[in-house]
Image: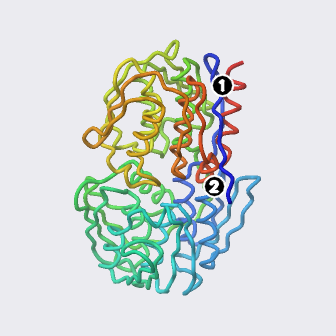
Amino acid sequence: MAVETHYQVPVAGGPLVFSIEVPGSKSITNRALLIAALCDREVRLSNVLFSDDSAHFMDCLSKLGFKVEVDEAQKIVKVRGEGGSIPKRRAEINVGSAGTAARFLTAFLAVSAGEYLIDASPQMAARPMKPLLEALKSLGARFEFLKQPDCLPLLVKGAGSPDGRVTLQANISSQFLSALLLVGCLGRAGLGIELDGDLAARPYVEMTLRMMRDFGVAVENDQFRKFKIPPHKYRGRDYSIEPDVSNANYFWATAVLTGGSALVKGVTLDSLQGDIQFLEVFKKLGSRIEEREGGIRVEGPPGGVFPGIEVDLGATPDQTLTLAALAPYASSPTIIKNVGLIKYHESNRMEATINELQRAGIRAEEYGDGLIIYPGKPRPAEIETYNDHRVAMAFALLGLRTPGIRIKNPDCTGKTFKDYFKYFDRVVTVGGG
């Protein structure tokens, strides 16, 4: 029987003042791994994130026959690209709980000429895949579902090419669109994509398009409604991965809560990552933002006193939980809008956020397609994490000002940041002087 583990959040005795380096971006790492496999030569990736998600992605590439060389100590991965083809025509892979690996590799295999089994964790098997699978079926891919319809695990027989036109629903995950964009250039005629409905988390698609350009593939884009990917080969190059801004935001948030300051090294305002936009939320909470040569510094509001705000986080939905963890300490209610898609992430994050705030004695409720959170005095609580890394990382922030906050299953942060709580401890110890 597994032993339940907990993390006791240390209380900050005053303002936290520190600088920190965070690991490489998960979103960029996994896009770079796929693009490297599609390139025409070996690609050297530096500052790679080594996490559960990226480990599954690398393992999948290896099982598909790609040559993958790993130097975890130096944060370097070399991938030998095969010009868009897959070395093995038959293989079995397991994407674990990695949404990017699940969606990107499913698309890659579905437009190939082989037959593959794609397995996943129960957590990933519960996440939506149908919109992507329907688009791939329209290109000629065939799927056999081994458990639940339109879910992993599945067998796929590839269409042999991504050529054609598809209509795609991408309102619950931008990864469906990114997956098709990344592999759309591999045929002889090109791929056209038209969106049916809204696009979720557009900054992640912008990231995909910028990275594709970095490797020599340009996409025609009509106001993020229609896309045309011409046939083209990715050009191999050395590529450095940015620090993970999604994770940086938790450390900047400590400056807001404690009235301190946090410098995250290596991050720039022109980051590829959409979550850099969350700095505007910190400004609304009374913080000062300063870009320095070494990174970005957030100076929190004096005394950690800040107002409740009303904000649309549709472009940065992963940060919903970050703001939710700050909201109890605001001077008025916080309203978070346009984040209904977080119900379909690693957990139902809408439900998880409300449940755990209520567990800590804070009134919170669903409000349209978002949340309303009322200020209050959190009480000691044992936070359920739902095996969701972002629930664990964000709700640790509560404990900086409330004694007795314990995070269950802290190892779930290994999905994207396996040493997160060691960093967190160091921030409180060193940052507090």
- Residue at x 45% of width, y 27% of height: 282
Q: Which quadrant, please, contains the C terminus?
A: top right
Badge 1 amino acid: Phe
Tag 2 secondary structure:
loop
The x and y percentages for residue 9 are: 63, 32
Q: In which quadrant of the rendered view does residue 324 lie?
A: top left
- Residue on which disc 1 sits: 18
The x and y percentages for residue 276 are: 46, 38
- Residue on which disc 2 sits: 51
Q: Do the residues labelled 1 and 2 touch (CB within 8 Å)?
A: no
Q: Which residue lies furthest to the front in this view?
A: 1
- Residue at x 38% of width, y 67% of height: 129
Q: Sequence-wise, which precedes: disc 1 or disc 2?
A: 1
Task: Characterize the local packing of mark 1: few (<14), some (14-19) or many (20 or more) Cα atoms within 10 angstroms.
Answer: many
The x and y percentages for residue 230 are: 36, 70
* In this picture, residue 222 sits left or right of residue 64: left
* In this picture, residue 278 sits left or right of residue 260: left
- Residue at x 48% of width, y 39% of height: 270
Q: Is residue 377 above or below residue 155?
A: above
Which circle marks residue 310 in the picture? none
The x and y percentages for residue 130 are: 34, 69
Badge 2 amino acid: Ser
Q: Residue furthest top?
A: 302
Q: Is residue 126 above or below residue 401?
A: below
Q: Which quadrant, please, contains the N terminus?
A: bottom right
